[in-house]
Amino acid sequence: MGKTYERIDGRLRAFIEEQPVFFTATAPLSADGTVNLSPKGLKGSFAILDELTVAYLDFAGSNAETIAHLRENGRITLMWCAFQGPPNIVRVHGRGEPVFRDDPRFAGLLARFPDIDPSAHGLRAVVVVTAELIRDTCGYAVPFMAYESERDLHARRFAREDDASLDAYFTKKEYIATSMDGLPGLPLPLPPSTV
């Protein structure tokens, strides 16, 4: 039932770009470490950079497990599933890297997300993923669910923060600078933006 693809293009690309939500999965190297699975949304916060490279914006939140795992080992899987239309699940297994705000590549990557105002969401990094394995599967058991609209809560919460207050917010959180497994997470103090 499943098929392996050499690149993200055509029908596969269209499917990925149409989905309003996707999921990221990462884990530390430690056998008893915490596996992290996160939903990602916000229209315009995901981009296909080329046939083997995708990126998404990493916004302020209460932990930084994905960043910590990527800094340690780079392994990541992204998954999209059809909640409407024909059943389908697409996974991109690859190597990821968080590109932080003080990285010279940051401004160029951020330009790939023209519909997002990063100041409204406490942008921490752009996560860039290079695909190593691209597969789809049937998704027959995924239920139909209707997309209603974007939530505005994240933007309303973080739009009032500047770099200093955002850094203070991150510093207070237990699992931002260090992951649940004790790995380095988000660099603090928060790197200044190059844009």
Image: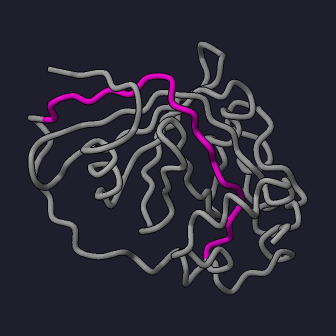
Q: In screen coordinates, is 82 left or right of 160? A: left
Instruction: Look at the magenta stretch and give its main secondary structure.
Output: strand
Q: Position of residue 174 (x, y in %)?
A: 73, 51
Between 115 and 31, the residue placed more toward the observer is 115
Residue lying at 21% horizontally and 28% vertically, measured from the top left: 137
Quadrant assignment for the N terminus: top left
Q: Is residue 130 magenta?
A: yes
Q: Residue at x 30, y 56 (%)?
A: 19
Q: Is residue 15 above or below residue 145?
A: above
- The spot of residue 81 in percent (x, y) is 25, 44
Q: Magenta span covers which residues?
A: 121-139
Please tell me which residue lies in front, 141 or 1.
Answer: 1
Question: Residue 70: x percent and y percent?
Answer: 67, 34
Judged left or right of residue 1, residue 78 is right
Q: Quadrant of the C terminus?
A: bottom right
Image: 188 above or below 97? below
Task: Name the quadrant containing residue 142.
Answer: top left
Examine the image and state in which quarter residue 173 appears: bottom right
At 58% across and 80% down in the image, what residue appears? 157
Q: Position of residue 108 (x, y in %)?
A: 72, 60
- Left or right: 185 with respect to 131? right
Q: Nearer the viewer, residue 153 or 191?
A: 191
Label tally: 0
The residue furthest top is 31
Query: From what the image shows, is residue 158 above or below residue 129?
Result: below
Image point (61%, 56%), residue name: 58
Closer to the camera in the image, 150 or 111 = 111
Give the answer, above or below, for where 194 lies relative to 4: below
